[in-house]
Amino acid sequence: MWFDIVNRFTFEHIFSGEAETLAQLVERAVKYGENLAEANLMRADLSGTNLKRARLQRAYLYGADLSGANLAGADLRDAKISKADLSCADLTRADLTAANLHRAILEGANLSKALLAKADLIGAHMANARLIGANMIGAFLTRADLTGADFTGADLTRAELLLSRGFKSVNERIEPSAVGAFSG
C-alpha cells in the first residue's frame, strides 16, 4: 500500500512510499534519518515502533497510538501530542520542550532525563511513569494523575501542580511558591 506523510501546515509531501502499514513507513523514514518536522500523523497507529532519535518537532500526533514505542532521544519540541497513548513508551532523553501532551496517556512511560520544560501535561494520566532526572521547569501538570510516578531528581521549578493527584515529593527541586500549588 502507498502512504504519504505530509506537512501539517503546507500539505507538502515529507516522505512517501510502499509499506504494509503507516507505522512501517514512519519507522523507515526515521531509520533513514528523514526530518519529519511538522508531519501530520494524527491518530496514527505507531504502537511498538522504533522511533529512536526521530525528528518530529511541531509534528501533529493528536490521538496517535504510540504505546510501547521507542522514542528515546526523539525531538518532539512543540509537538501536538494531546490525547495520544504513550503508555509504556520509552521517552528517555526525549526533547518535549513546550510540547502539548494535554490529556495524554503516559502510564508506565519512561521519561527519565527527558526535557519537559513548559510542556502542557494538563490532565495527563502519568500513573507509574518514570521521570527520574527530568527537566520539568515551568511544566503544567494541572489535574494530572501522578499516582506512583517517580520524580527522583526531577526539576519541578515553577511547575504548576494545581489539583494534580498522587504527587509524592522525592528529592525534586521545587520553589517554595510552587509547594502550595498542588494537592495530593
Image: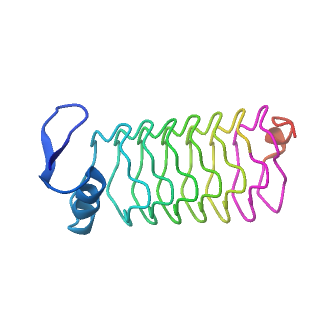
Displayed quadrant of residue 48: bottom left
Determine the main secondary structure of the stretch shown in magenta. Answer: loop
Q: Residue 183, percent across and down? A: 86, 36
In this view, the residue in front, 40 or 75, is 40
Residue 20: quarter of image: bottom left
Query: Horizontal placement of 151 versus 37: left or right?
Result: right
Residue 172 in the magenta stretch? The answer is yes
Look at the picture and state if 17 lies above or below 42: below
Does 8 sit left or right of 81 as displayed?
left
Residue, x 63% and y 48% (percent of image)? 137
Q: From what the image shows, is residue 136 above or below residue 165? A: below
Q: Nearer the viewer, residue 131 or 147?
A: 147
In the rendered view of the protein, which quadrant contains the C terminus? top right
Marks counted in the figure total 0
Residue 142 picture location, percent across and down? 70, 33
Q: Is residue 13 left or right of residue 182?
A: left
Which stretch appears magenta?
Answer: 146-174
Point 52% across, 36% down: residue: 83
**Residue at the (51%, 65%) spot, across then down:** 93
Which of the pair 84/181 is nearer the observer?
A: 84
- Please state the horizontal and vertical placement of residue 72, each as a whole percent of the image: 46, 66
Q: Residue 99: percent from the left, percent from the top?
A: 48, 42
Q: How is the image coloured?
A: rainbow
Left/right placement of residue 9 relative to residue 142 reads left
Depth check, front residue: 40 or 160: 40
Magenta stretch holds residue 118: no
